[in-house]
């Protein structure tokens, strides 16, 4: 082989090596793994304030509900309760019985009615008026002992959620006025609800 041929062969070989080297792709680098994001549980919702019956706060065996800053009572277990601006109420899930407490500026019938009437309306009690309270409270009360606290009570009829009902009114004299309460229910619910409602009425306590 002539020297020129050798040179030509060498040039061709080098050219082929360069061409192959240019076509060879560099090794592919592994893609970085995405950062691990720990799944965070959503924060627990705040406990209900129990300022509306729509919140469906439920009475329990160890639960007492404040009557503003003037006292407290224990709603029947399982009843829905609410601490309202002008007092506190509790009502059955079936909407056939309820209890309400408020603070009145005195024991006079007009003051008792003024304190209770918004709560009675909230429970669905109708057919009671300031005059009916006045006539009822002129009668001699039945005095109950609520754990050492005097409770004057009167009973009357009413409408509860549009049905024939019955109501027991209670007034507990205090130094700054009176704690006033009412249990009301449909007449046909009295057998099932009366005992627990009376227990709730007698659970009232004055003071914080």
Image (cartoon, rainbow, N blue to C red):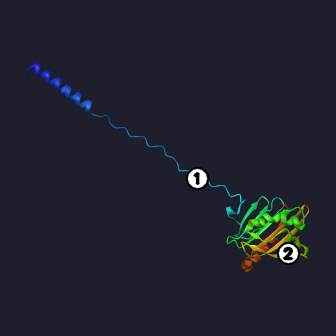
Q: Are marks 1 and 2 in contact (CB under 8 Å)?
A: no
Q: With respect to residue 33, does 116 lie above or below?
A: below
Question: From the image, which quarter does the N terminus lie in?
Answer: top left
Q: Residue 109 location in percent, x, y?
A: 88, 68
Foreground mark, 1 or 2?
A: 2
Q: Residue 134 location in percent, x, y?
A: 88, 71
Q: Residue at x 75, y 61 (%)?
A: 83
Q: Residue at x 88, y 61 (%)?
A: 105
Callout 2 environment at 10 Å: few (<14), some (14 to 19), or many (20+)? Answer: some
In the picture of the structure, the residue carrying the numbered disc 2 is: 154
Image-quadrant location for residue 201: bottom right
Classify residue 30 as left or right of residue 140.
left
In the picture of the structure, the residue carrying the numbered disc 1 is: 42
Callout 1 environment at 10 Å: few (<14), some (14 to 19), or many (20+)? Answer: few
Q: Residue 77 location in percent, x, y?
A: 72, 70
Q: Nearer the viewer, residue 77 or 24?
A: 77
Q: Residue furthest top?
A: 3
Image-quadrant location for residue 49: bottom right
Q: Secondary structure at mark 2?
A: strand
Q: Secondary structure at mark 1?
A: loop
Q: Residue at x 29, y 34 (%)?
A: 25
Q: Nearer the viewer, residue 64 or 33?
A: 64
Q: Indicate which disc, 1 or 2, sits on the residue closer to the N terminus.
A: 1
């Amino acid at each position: 082989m002539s020297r020129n041929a050798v040179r030509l062969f060498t040039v061709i070989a080098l050219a082929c090596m360069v061409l192959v080297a240019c076509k060879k792709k560099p090794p592919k680098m592994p893609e970085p793994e995405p950062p691990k994001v720990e799944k965070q549980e959503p924060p627990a919702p705040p406990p209900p304030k129990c300022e509306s019956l729509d919140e469906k706060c439920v009475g329990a065996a160890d639960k007492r509900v404040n009557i503003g800053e003037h006292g407290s009572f224990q709603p029947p277990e399982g009843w829905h309760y609410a601490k309202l601006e002008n007092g506190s109420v509790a009502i059955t899930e079936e909407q056939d019985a309820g209890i309400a407490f408020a603070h009145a500026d005195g024991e006079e019938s007009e003051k008792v009615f003024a304190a209770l009437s918004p709560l009675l309306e909230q429970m669905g009690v109708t057919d009671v008026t300031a005059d009916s309270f006045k006539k009822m409270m002129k009668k001699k009360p039945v005095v109950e002992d609520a754990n050492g606290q005097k409770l004057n009570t009167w009973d009357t009829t009413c409408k509860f959620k549009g049905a024939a009902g019955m109501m027991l009114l209670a007034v507990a004299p205090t130094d700054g006025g009176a704690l006033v309460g009412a249990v009301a229910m449909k007449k046909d619910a009295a057998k099932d609800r009366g005992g627990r409602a009376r227990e709730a009425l007698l659970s009232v306590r004055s003071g914080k």
